[in-house]
Image (tube, helix red, strand yellow):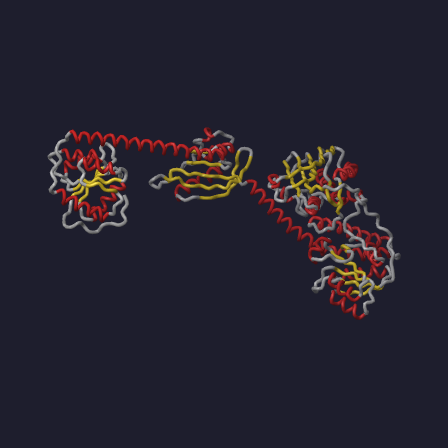
């Protein structure tokens, strides 16, 4: 029954005692409230039997009764009132929301009701109806005893009630079927879900858990019911879980959390929503939870953070290597000058030779830093990784000790890779040296290759992985293994697990840089005491494989008499380059910036034959922009660019490729002399790389640095 407002005035001055019979407590109380506000006295009963009992003790002015009620319905109640001769004719109003057909109204009136109304009428109208019915009933006599016609009516009423009850029963059966179907749908949804769905009590005991959740504990659903948190988790985790559950009980509010918890044979990150389950009184009776496994996402998130950290470290390493290369070029240049003098005594010559050797070793370290930061130039070719391993086999046997057994497992029909041959050799050599040092008492070292198809699902396992066809190089040892908390650091430069002085920590950093520079990625798995496996994924190529091109040994360098302008902002480096070229017979001018170079050019009327310029300078005029300005005045001017960065990085920064050879720092006097002579003779060669000549494999063995 719904009323839009509360009645505040009574009906006239005739206040009445009204009896309401209704099994619906909410509707009964609402009607009571409305009539009491109108000034009437109101009694209430839940059915006809209770109403008759109240009439024995109270003088009633008006009766309002629902139709369908337990024990005695409204029709029977009305009949019982009317058939009792001792009772005056009390106005009887049948109000209903269920039996609203004309036939229902006819039966009610025959049974002795004064009025048949629907519960949807507004409260003011209900009060007005009460007044009219009460006035009209004053002259109405009581009903006589039942007659045959009334018995027929009672029979009709009974038949109608039976029909109504059958309808209700059918409706109840339909609702029961729908409820059962709904429960089955939700049960199927819960049982087929890939999330853990559970219900726990206040004490943390499991009241329900779906199949997926039970499997994570290695138990059946039946075995899980009633289990306490302490039965499922270690004490600290169980206590934390219980605090969270009890917090939801107390607050009555949903809660979300992300946490890693230990399960049998694994640790799982869960994103969990906890929701309070309340009864009709609003009390929390249990807590329902939905826990989603986000372990893979957390792993990828950690990998992404590690990758970003490595990128930052790589930028730092590349910048340090670039600046250090300038210094090394000066040191090596002056060491060469001193060694070229013939009047040095043997002790001084030995000392200078040691300086040169140390500078040379330092330049190799900076080269590795450039490799790690992917700022080292590559000579890409289409290569067969199996062939590279075959060429390295004998040398690798000499690198490892006799108690280490080396095994090669080559995959047939391996796709080609587009790579720098010497860099690939360095990757293998560094991994082998790292494995050798992990097996001081001997063991097994297995190097294998295979073709791997990475689909979208597999690519999600690693933050740097991408779908496609890859060549996988695996280097597995049976050594001491790597502690879990150290695995994320093994590729960081200068990180090493060895004693001080036993390693530089650049070996695996170099491997990481090379693989990244080749658009691949590395995956590492390790178990303490059982060994480590490195898997390198390189994009496969459809091209035919070409034989690796080996650089020839450095030839003798010829000098000349041409005029050269050196443009370099580092004074020491500029001076040593000028000294080198002067010794080769060239006439040399020097400038500390592009602006100063333009001034010298104007003063000498552009008599320069070649400009040796740094690509990136501090005054805003790059080497490439300087050369363009000078070539506008002298089109046949030869230009050589110098840089401590890689060719790829230079092209990215300048947006346009330089139109001349690039000489990478640090360079030796012979490298500078060769580059100048070839440029003047119009031999436009590729840039001179700082990488080591791949033909000198014994030298590679000395340079391999473990992590």
- In the rendered image, residue 188, in percent from the top left (x then y), is placed at 46, 33
- In the rendered image, residue 273, in percent from the top left (x then y), is placed at 46, 42
Quadrant in which the N terminus appears: top left
Q: Quadrant of residue 332?
A: bottom right
Quadrant in which the C terminus appears: top right
- In the rendered image, residue 45, in percent from the top left (x then y), is placed at 21, 38
Q: Is residue 43 left or right of residue 248?
A: left
User: Taking 651 as reference, is 265 above or below it?
Assistant: above
User: Taking 631 as reference, is 554 above or below it?
Assistant: above
Question: Camera-side residue: 556 or 76?
Answer: 76
Question: Camera-side residue: 569 or 10?
Answer: 10
Total marks in image: 0
Residue at point 34%, 39% (across, down): 280
Q: Quadrant of residue 19?
A: top left
The furthest residue to the bottom = 603
Q: Is residue 121 left or right of residue 498?
A: left
Q: Is residue 556 left or right of residue 592?
A: right
- In the rendered image, residue 468, in percent from the top left (x then y), is placed at 66, 41
The furthest residue to the right = 342
User: Taking 425 as reference, is 587 above or below it?
Assistant: below
User: Taking 254 as reference, is 582 above or below it?
Assistant: below
Examine the rendering and report whether any part of residue 300 can be seen. Answer: yes
Q: Quadrant of residue 66?
A: top left
Residue at point 23%, 42% (across, down): 117
Examine the rendering and report whether any part of residue 404 can be seen. Answer: no
Question: Camera-side residue: 263 or 97?
Answer: 97
């Amino acid at each position: 029954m719904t009323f839009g407002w509360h009645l505040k005035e009574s009906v006239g001055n005739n206040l009445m005692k009204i009896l309401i019979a209704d099994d619906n407590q909410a509707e009964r109380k609402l009607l009571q409230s409305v009539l009491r506000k109108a000034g009437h006295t109101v009694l209430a009963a839940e059915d006809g039997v209770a109403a008759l009992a109240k009439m024995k003790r109270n003088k009633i002015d008006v009766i309002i009764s629902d139709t369908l009620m337990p024990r005695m319905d409204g029709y029977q109640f009305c009949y019982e009132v009317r058939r009792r001769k001792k009772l005056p004719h009390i106005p009887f109003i049948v109000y209903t929301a269920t039996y609203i057909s004309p036939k229902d109204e006819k039966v009610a009136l025959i049974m002795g009701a004064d009025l048949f109304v629907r519960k949807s009428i507004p409260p003011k109208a209900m009060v007005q109806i009460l007044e009219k019915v009460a006035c009209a009933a004053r002259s109405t006599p009581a009903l006589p005893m039942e007659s045959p016609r009334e018995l027929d009516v009672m029979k009709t009423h009974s038949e109608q009630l039976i029909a109504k009850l059958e309808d209700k029963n059918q409706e109840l059966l339909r609702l029961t079927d729908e409820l059962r179907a709904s429960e089955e749908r939700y049960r199927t949804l819960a049982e087929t879900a890939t999330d853990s769905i559970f219900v726990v009590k206040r004490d943390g005991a499991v009241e329900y858990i779906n199949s997926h959740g039970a499997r994570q504990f290695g138990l059946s659903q039946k075995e899980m019911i009633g289990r306490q948190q302490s039965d499922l988790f270690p004490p600290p985790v169980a206590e934390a879980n219980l605090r969270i559950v009890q917090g939801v009980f107390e607050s009555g509010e949903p809660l979300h959390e992300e946490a890693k918890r230990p399960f049998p044979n694994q640790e799982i990150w869960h994103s969990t929503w906890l929701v309070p389950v309340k009864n009709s009184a609003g009390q929390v009776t249990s807590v329902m939870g939905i826990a989603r496994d986000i372990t893979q996402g957390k792993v990828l998130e950690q990998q992404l953070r590690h990758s970003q950290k490595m990128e930052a470290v790589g930028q730092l390493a590349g910048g340090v290597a670039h600046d250090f290369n300038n210094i090394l070029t000066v040191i090596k240049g002056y060491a060469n000058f001193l060694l070229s003098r013939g009047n040095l005594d043997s002790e001084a010559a030995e000392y200078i030779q040691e300086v040169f050797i140390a500078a040379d070793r330092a330049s190799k370290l900076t080269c590795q830093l450039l490799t790690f930061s992917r700022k080292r130039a590559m000579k890409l070719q289409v290569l067969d990784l199996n062939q590279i391993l075959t060429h390295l086999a004998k040398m690798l046997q000499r690198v490892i000790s006799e108690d280490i057994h080396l095994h090669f497992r080559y995959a047939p029909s391996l796709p080609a890779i587009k790579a720098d041959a010497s860099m690939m050799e360095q990757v293998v050599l560094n991994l082998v040296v790292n494995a050798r040092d992990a097996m001081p008492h001997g063991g097994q070292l297995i190097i294998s290759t295979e073709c791997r198809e990475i689909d979208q699902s597999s690519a999600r396992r690693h933050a740097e992985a991408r779908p496609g066809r890859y060549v996988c190089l695996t280097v597995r040892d049976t050594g001491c293994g790597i502690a879990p908390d150290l695995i994320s650091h093994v590729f960081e430069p200068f990180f090493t697990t060895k004693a001080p002085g036993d390693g530089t920590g650049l070996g695996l950093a170099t491997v990481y840089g090379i693989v990244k520079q080749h658009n691949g990625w590395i995956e590492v798995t390790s178990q303490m005491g059982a060994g480590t496996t490195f898997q390198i994924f390189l994009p496969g190529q459809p091209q035919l494989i070409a034989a690796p091109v080996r650089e020839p040994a450095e030839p003798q360098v010829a000098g000349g008499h041409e005029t050269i302008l050196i443009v370099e902002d580092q004074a020491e480096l500029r001076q040593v380059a000028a000294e080198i070229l002067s010794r080769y017979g060239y006439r040399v001018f020097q400038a500390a910036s592009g602006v100063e170079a333009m001034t010298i050019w104007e003063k000498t009327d552009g008599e320069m034959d070649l400009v040796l310029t740094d690509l990136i300078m501090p005054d805003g005029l790059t080497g490439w922009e300087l050369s363009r300005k000078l070539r506008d005045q002298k089109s046949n001017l030869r230009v050589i660019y110098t840089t401590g960065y890689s060719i790829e990085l230079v092209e990215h920064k300048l947006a346009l490729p330089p139109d001349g050879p690039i000489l990478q720092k640090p360079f030796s006097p012979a490298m500078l002399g060769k580059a100048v002579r070839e440029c003047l003779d119009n031999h436009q060669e590729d840039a001179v790389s700082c990488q080591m000549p791949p033909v000198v494999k014994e030298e590679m063995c000395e340079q391999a640095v473990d992590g």
